[in-house]
Image: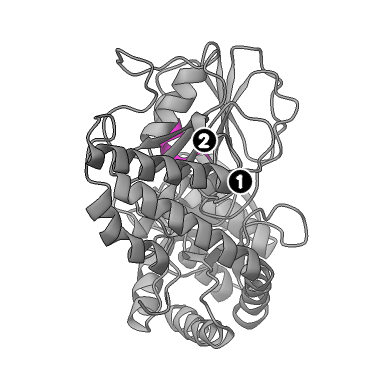
Amino acid sequence: MGLITAFQSESPLHPKAREVLLDAFDQGWAEPRKIHQASRRAALLRDEARQSLATSLQVRGGDLHFLGEASLGFHLGISGLLNGTMYHSATSRSEVFAIAHGVNAVEIPFNSPLPLGAPGDVLAWQAVNGETGIRAADPQGFTGRIFLDATATHSGNHGRWDAALWDSGTWTGPRGLGIFVVKSREVWKNPLPHLDQRVAPGDRSIPLVLASAVALENFAQGYAAARARIRTMNERIRHFVLNEIGDVDIAGDFESMEIGEPAKLSLSFLYVDAEQLVSELDRAGFAVDSGSACSSLEMKPSHVLAAMGLLTHGNVRLTLRAEHTDSYIDSFLVALKECVLRLR
Amino acid sequence: MIKVDSRGKSCPQPIIDIAAAMNLHADEVDFTLRSDDEATWIDLQAWARMTGHRIEITGDDSFVITR
C-alpha cells in the first residue's frame, strides 16, 4: 500500500494490520467459547489482541470489551453509569446529544467551568474534540462518574474516568469496531437487555480485533516518533493560511495548551463556499473534510464550530499524518491558496 | 442606513452580500441585513469578531451592522 495522501479523518487499514488479516481469518474463525481446537485457537488470538490493546491504552485487559459498533459505546457508557443528571459539552458528538435528549441533562457551553456534580451524576467528557483537536478542561473536580469519550485519540492517559470508549478507526485499524472499557462493575449497570454478566452484546470478528491491536501498536509507535513533526506541520499550515491567504478563522490557540491533538486542524475561510472548496481541492488531488452546512446532507452547520463561536462557512478539516511529507504539505498549501482566492 | 436583503440565500452568501454592500458604500456606517439562513447569526458573530464591526440582532431574520 502506498503513502496516505489525503487529509480526511478516515484512512485505509494500517499496512501491518492488513498483513495479519488474512492469516487471522484462517486462525480466528471459530466461536471462542466452544472447546474445539479451532475455538481454543480463536480464544487465544482474542485474548492476545485484548492484552495488546489494553497495554497500548493503559487499561486492564479484563476491563476491556469489544463492540461491533463503536457508537453503541456512548449508550453503554453514559446510560450504564447514570443515576442522576447527565452533563455534557456543547461540542459533544451527536450520539451524546441523542442520549441527553431522553434524560435529565445539562449542556455545558464551550469554555465554561465544569460542574461539580453529585455522586450519581455522569459527565460525558470528550478528551479531544475530533473536529478541531481541542482538548477539554480536565474534569478533576467533578464528584460524579465520568464517561470518557476517547474516540478521537489513540491513548489511554486521560486522568480519572469510570468508563471509556475508543474507536479502532482512529488508529488506522478496522472501522466499525469500538473498544469499551468499564473500570468498576459496581457503579456500572448494563443498560441493554441482558441475561448474563457480559458487557458487550453479540459477536464480533476476532480477525478484525487482532488487526486493530496490530494497527494500534504500530500507529502509536509511528505517531510518537512523528508527533513533533506533525505539530510543526500544524503550526506551519496555521502560519501560512493566516499570512498568505488571510480572512481565516482557525480553531484553537496554538500557543496555549488548548491543542490536545495536533493532527487535527479546522480552518474556516471567510466568503468561501465550503462545498466548492472541498470539490476544487479534490480536483487538485487533495481530499479534505468539512463541517460547513453546504457540505453536509442535512444542510446544518457543524454544531462544534457553532458552539465554539467559529465561522461555520468555508470550513475545511484536516487530519495530519506521519506519512505527510513537507513537500506534500507545500503542494497542498499552494493548491489551497489558489482555490480560496479563486472562489473569493 | 443601507438595506441588504439576503432572504432565501444560504451561507456564505448573506455574509458575502453584507461585506459587498459595505465595500460599495464605503462612507456609510449603518447597515441592515435580512437573512433567514440558520447559520447567518452564528457567522455574523464570527465575522464581526474577525473584521471589527458591531452587530445586533433585531428580529428573527433582521440584523444591524455598524462599521
Q: Residues within 10 Å of mark 1 (few under 14, many from 20)?
A: some
Q: Residue at x 52, y 17 (%)?
A: A185
Region of the chain picked out in magenta, as a range = A92-96
* Helix, strand or loop status at disc 1: strand
- The x and y percentages for residue A338 are 48, 86
Residue B56's label in the rendered image is: 1
Quadrant assignment for the N terminus of chain A: bottom left
When the figure is inspected, residue A190 is found, relative to residue B21, above or below; the finding is above
- The x and y percentages for residue B31 are 57, 58
Q: Residue at x 24, y 30 (%)?
A: A34
- The x and y percentages for residue A331 are 50, 87
When the figure is inspected, residue A150 is found, relative to residue A191, above or below; the finding is below
Write down the quadrant of residue A142 in the picture: top right
- The x and y percentages for residue A36 are 22, 35
Q: Residue at x 58, y 37 (%)?
A: A59
Report the Cα–Cα distance between label 2 and label 1: 55 Å
> In the shown orientation, is residue A58 left or right of residue A313?
right
Q: Nearer the viewer, residue A277 or A44?
A: A44
Residue highlighted by disc 2: A61
